[in-house]
């Protein structure tokens, strides 16, 4: 075990030992095929319910959210997700236009509930002089407590903040709130937490999601990154839970774009240790999904990595890490999802297992208790400066030292979409395991994606392509086996607009592959688009764009007639090589619309600087389909 030399109470140590006793060998040699088969165990019928949710939301129980000013509890968060009006931390009334189907409050495991207790004057905490001084400043104006906001990741915090005596009651409250909110078949409240591992500013955060209820989840404490920041220790914790309590659990990484290149390692592990088959197998086993988009930036790809992709520069955070360390271009390949998928093909050739064979989801990572990501109803990242105000576009929301992240860089994103048979914890978890999930930056775009060998144009013409897709192919998140008779694979795509959002510009299929020399490649194909009578692919291989000027920024309006209500097609790969491993995923683009910064400018009468983006082109990302030669 690679545990930090940290002083913790005997109770916390006992909890850790009980929950994290699996050896490296046991966790890494788990039969990944058997586990995947169990996760894909099918109930009656095909997954025909599209569920929308967020598995990454913080409340006042998180130390950083509390310091920023969050005063909403998990109960408040679930009420808001269900469509009820709640009073936000700044006193404003907040409500979702359309309720969610599921939510997981994922407060930070480290220091869970500690600042609620500090505010309440818990003598375990106020006995420490440093904590008494912190308490005296918690309710002062923000300028007088700025240095408290990044304290969650500092190594010299008083150890009592992370003691089980403080955290255990709040873990119990978290479980109880989820159980109160859970209504199988109508609304699912999942149980989980965030493991906030990082060294310096190198983000390695994971959200941990349980399939189970309080009878099993209540038997463990969430693993704190104060105790260990090693991913292999997290995998041991997950294996121990399943072995000791008969439950199911998974992990979802996020914000590789703030990892300084170590989220998706290729030649050596996160902190310079050698890459091993043990690590590759463990990561493949425990991380079936990746959070590709959220408030702290979009993580699909970067213009430096995908120079031929005209839509690669979308909501990009590429300046600094959490500690203000400037980025260098050599870091990007280890930070973005498309590059990770290509690296996975390379590692699979070396170890026989692909550690980055994950599905995509979006979530918020909001620290407000409010899962709200519509551009015209964005409640921001942090309660201190990000709820609607005349200054939130320029307020600093991250970074230390001389480098800061201004508020306008925050993206209003995202949500997770799940294809399931019913709205229950078990069904949602199982969809994650089989990767039949996808991500959007906020709009609830309905998306189906199937791969097969004999799909015809007529298979895509119906309102829902599921009958042909499941009958003669495989859905997103699956492996496409080689065809008996040869030929190129065909992919069915059906995308439908969110009725409360903008129409659709185009559907693209992104392909990545590895050649005989071990080199990886990528290509973006425009496969179907709006107004095909007036738009076409030119000699440069690019689709003619929507005419300019469709967004009226000052009035926050846009021309929706340039898009389509739905787009569908059966597309055959024109460059298929049956000897090359490959992956395919769908990217759906809406027509351009006003960004949240434009809505703020109109509401508060602000003249934004030219460098602040005022227009966005929101999107959805399907989970990939992988092809492996026989």
Image: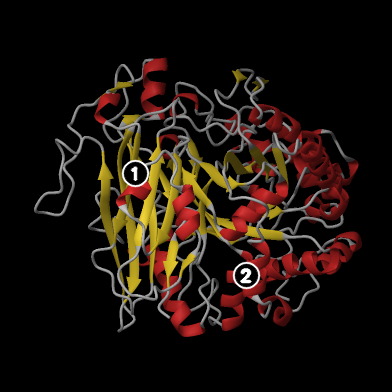
Color theme of the render = secondary structure
The residue at the point 42 percent across, 30 percent down is 393
Residue most toward the left?
A: 539
Q: Is residue 435 above or below residue 341?
A: above
Is label 1 in a helix, a strand or a loop? Answer: strand
The residue at the point 87 percent across, 51 percent down is 215
Q: Is residue 178 above or below residue 527?
A: above
In this orientation, which residue lies closer to the viewer: 435 or 326? 435
On the image, numbered disc 2 is attached to which residue? 285
The crowd level at tag 2 (other Cα within 10 Å; few <14, some 14-19, many 20+) is many
On the image, numbered disc 1 is attached to which residue? 568
Question: If you read the primary sequence from the N terminus, does the residue marked by circle 2 or circle 1 appear first?
Answer: 2
Residue 624 in view, yes or no: yes
In this orientation, which residue lies closer to the viewer: 144 or 502? 502
Q: Position of residue 67 (x, y in %)?
A: 66, 37
As drawn, is 153 to the left or to the right of 600?
Answer: right
Is label 2 in a helix, a strand or a loop? Answer: helix
């Amino acid at each position: 075990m690679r545990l930090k030399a940290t002083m913790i109470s005997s109770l916390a140590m006992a909890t850790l030992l009980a929950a994290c006793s699996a050896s490296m060998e046991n966790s890494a040699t788990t039969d990944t095929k058997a586990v995947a088969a169990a996760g894909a165990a099918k109930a009656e019928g095909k997954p025909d319910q599209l569920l929308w949710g967020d598995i990454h939301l913080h409340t006042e129980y998180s130390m950083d959210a509390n310091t920023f000013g969050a005063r909403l509890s998990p109960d408040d968060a679930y009420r808001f997700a269900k469509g009820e009006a709640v009073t936000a931390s700044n006193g404003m009334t907040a409500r979702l236009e359309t309720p969610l189907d599921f939510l997981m409050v994922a407060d930070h495991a480290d220091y869970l509930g500690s600042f609620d207790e500090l505010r309440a004057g818990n003598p375990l905490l106020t006995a420490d002089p440093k904590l008494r001084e912190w308490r005296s400043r918690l309710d002062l104006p923000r300028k007088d407590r700025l240095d408290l906001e990044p304290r969650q990741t500092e190594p010299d915090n008083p150890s009592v903040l992370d003691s089980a005596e403080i955290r255990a009651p709040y873990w119990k409250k978290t479980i109880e709130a989820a159980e109160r909110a859970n209504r199988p078949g109508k609304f699912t409240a999942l149980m989980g937490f965030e493991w906030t591992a990082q060294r310096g500013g190198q983000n390695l955060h994971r959200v941990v999601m349980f399939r189970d209820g309080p009878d099993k989840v209540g038997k463990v404490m969430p693993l704190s990154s104060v105790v260990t920041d090693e991913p292999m220790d997290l995998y041991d914790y997950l294996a121990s839970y399943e072995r000791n309590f008969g439950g199911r659990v998974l992990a979802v990484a996020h914000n590789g774009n703030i990892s300084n290149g170590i989220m998706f390692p290729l030649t050596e592990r996160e902190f310079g240790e050698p890459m091993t088959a043990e690590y590759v197998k463990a990561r493949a086993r425990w991380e079936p999904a990746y959070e590709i988009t959220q408030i702290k930036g979009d993580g699909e790809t970067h213009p430096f990595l995908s120079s031929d992709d005209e839509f690669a520069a979308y909501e990009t955070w590429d300046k600094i890490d959490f500690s203000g360390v400037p980025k260098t271009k050599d870091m990007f390949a280890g930070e973005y999802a498309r590059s990770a998928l290509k690296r996975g093909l390379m590692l699979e050739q070396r170890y026989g297992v692909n550690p980055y064979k994950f599905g995509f989801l979006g979530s918020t990572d909001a620290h407000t208790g409010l899962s709200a990501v519509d551009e015209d109803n964005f409640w921001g990242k942090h309660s201190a400066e990000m709820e609607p105000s005349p200054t939130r576009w320029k307020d600093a929301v991250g970074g230390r030292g001389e480098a800061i992240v201004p508020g306008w860089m925050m993206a209003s994103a995202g949500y997770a979409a799940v294809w399931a048979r019913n709205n229950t914890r078990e069904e949602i978890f199982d969809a994650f395991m089989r990767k039949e999930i996808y991500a959007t930056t906020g709009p609830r775009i309905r998306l189906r994606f199937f791969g097969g060998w004999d799909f015809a144009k007529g298979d895509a013409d119906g309102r829902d392509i599921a009958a042909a897709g499941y009958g003669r192919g495989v859905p997103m998140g699956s492996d496409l086996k080689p065809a008996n008779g040869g030929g190129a694979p065909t992919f069915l795509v059906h995308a439908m607009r969110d009725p409360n959002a903008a129409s659709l510009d185009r559907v693209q299929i992104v392909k990545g592959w590895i050649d005989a020399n071990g080199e990886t490649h990528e290509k973006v194909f425009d496969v179907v688009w709006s107004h095909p009578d007036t738009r076409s692919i030119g000699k440069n291989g690019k689709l003619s764009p929507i005419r300019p000027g469709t967004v009226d920024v000052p009035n926050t309006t846009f021309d929706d007639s340039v898009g389509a209500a739905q787009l569908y097609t059966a597309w055959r790969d024109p460059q298929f090589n049956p000897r090359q491993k490959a992956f395919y995923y769908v990217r759906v683009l809406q027509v351009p619309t006003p960004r949240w910064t434009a809505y703020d400018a109109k509401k508060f009468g602000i003249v934004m600087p030219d460098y602040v983006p005022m227009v966005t082109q929101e999107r959805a990302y399907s989970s990939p389909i992988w092809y492996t030669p026989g």
